[in-house]
Amino acid sequence: MTPIYNFMSSARQSIEMTMYELSDPAAEQILITDHERGVRVRVLLDRDYSGGSVNQAAYSTLSAAGVPVAWANDSEIFHQKTITVDDAQSAIMTANLTSQYYATTRDFVIMDNQSADVAAIESVFTSDWSGAVPSPGPVGADLVWSPGSEPQLVALIDSAQRSVEVENEEMDSSAIEGALETDASRGVAVTVIMTSDSDWDSAFSQLESAGVHVVLYPDTSSALSIHAKVIDVDGAKAFVGSENFSTASLDYNRELGVITSSTAVLGPLNSALSGDTASGQEQPGTSNRAPATSATPPSAQTPTTPPALACSPIDDEGGCYESGEYCRDDDHGMTGRAGNGQVITCEYNNAAWYWESS
């Protein structure tokens, strides 16, 4: 969290925060210090769901220090996790500011300095700060707002040509599940990485039956907890944000995410997802199951259509890397997956960088 703390401390004029859960004494003290040195600080906290009880202590601490803090409209859950500094850059987070979970939870933060995005985020914050009922926000350059995010996320999944990797905390959206199953049925390599939860067993079973690779982590204190909300398509475009795969999160809550093609984001993101896939437990019966195919006769198929690739990253010709091949400069230190499913890492060996099997 050091980069986030440094980001918050860098404020010179303003800092605006919308946070589902705030229970981090270090972050709270930074907000107080910012306020005391003349930065305009505004903190908007959820109180409709668990946020209400979790946030009460932080609300009281900030209020006592004179920091402007407000409860969000409690007609819906404010599940967004965003920090904007000096009207110039926003941290769009999958993580809450709850320090007890930092060491054991998978989360991501995208730092967004696109002026259209920052302006859109500030516009929505102004409306939400006034106590308005949440409504869809302006898309800026590439933002994904709830309420109303389902169509954008389904369209992203539908756009996949080779692979889809997903991390999420919930699997309770028929639209998202249907899109993942459709991808698998048309030959896209689909991987879902989550923490095991009996609430989603039925969804997992249905996904597995459609050919989706389901990779689970045990719901124990010693295991990595998958809290991130990510859709990575073809290793080339990804959604990262606060939206869980549920009707409430997609259609009613206040949520915020972003869809990006930035190589600076996708490199480490793809590496993290590959590592999470390799370290989790693929569910029995999914690793060798071929995805269902359509009834299109062979004569009607286009012979130039390339096979689906379950690998990442994708090489410059759109194919898979294999162990022993040279790495690109951008891939140094990255962990990926070869065309045969083997985990490979870009390592320095004999005066050059090669993909090596792990």
Image (cartoon, rainbow, N blue to C red):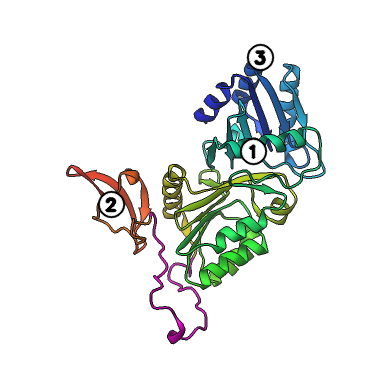
Which residue type does callout 1 highlight?
Lys
Asked whether 243 or 171 is in front, the reply is 243
Q: Is residue 231 found left or right of 80 in the rendered image?
A: left
Q: Is 289 colored magenta in this rendering?
A: yes
- Location of residue 241 with respect to 310 vertically, above or below: above
Residue under the image location 46 percent in, 58 percent down:
234
Residue 234 visible somewhere in the drawing: yes
Magenta range is 284-313
In the picture of the structure, the residue carrying the numbered disc 3 is 38
Identify residue for label 1: 81
| Quarter holding residue 23 | top right
Q: Are marks 3 and 1 in contact (CB under 8 Å)?
A: no
The kind of residue tagged 2 is: Trp
Measuring from the top left, give residue 266's x and y in whole percent.
45, 47
Under circle 1, the secondary element is strand
Q: Quadrant of residue 64?
A: top right
Marked residue nearer the N-terminal end (3 or 1):
3
- Residue 182: which numbered mark, if any? none
Residue 45 vs residue 257, the one in the foreground: 257
Q: Residues within 10 Å of mark 1 (few under 14, many from 20)?
A: many
Q: Nearer the viewer, mark 3 or mark 1?
A: 3
Q: Earlier in the sequence, mark 2 or mark 3?
A: 3
Name the main secondary structure of what is drawn in magenta: loop
- From the image, state whether disc 2 or disc 3 is nearer to you: 3
Which labelled disc corresponds to residue 355? 2
Q: Position of residue 121 (x, y in %)?
A: 66, 37
Say which label, 1 or 2, has the lower sequence index: 1
Q: Secondary structure at mark 3?
A: loop
The kind of secondary structure element at disc 2 is strand
Q: Position of residue 292 (x, y in %)?
A: 50, 76
Residue at image position (61%, 25%) is 86
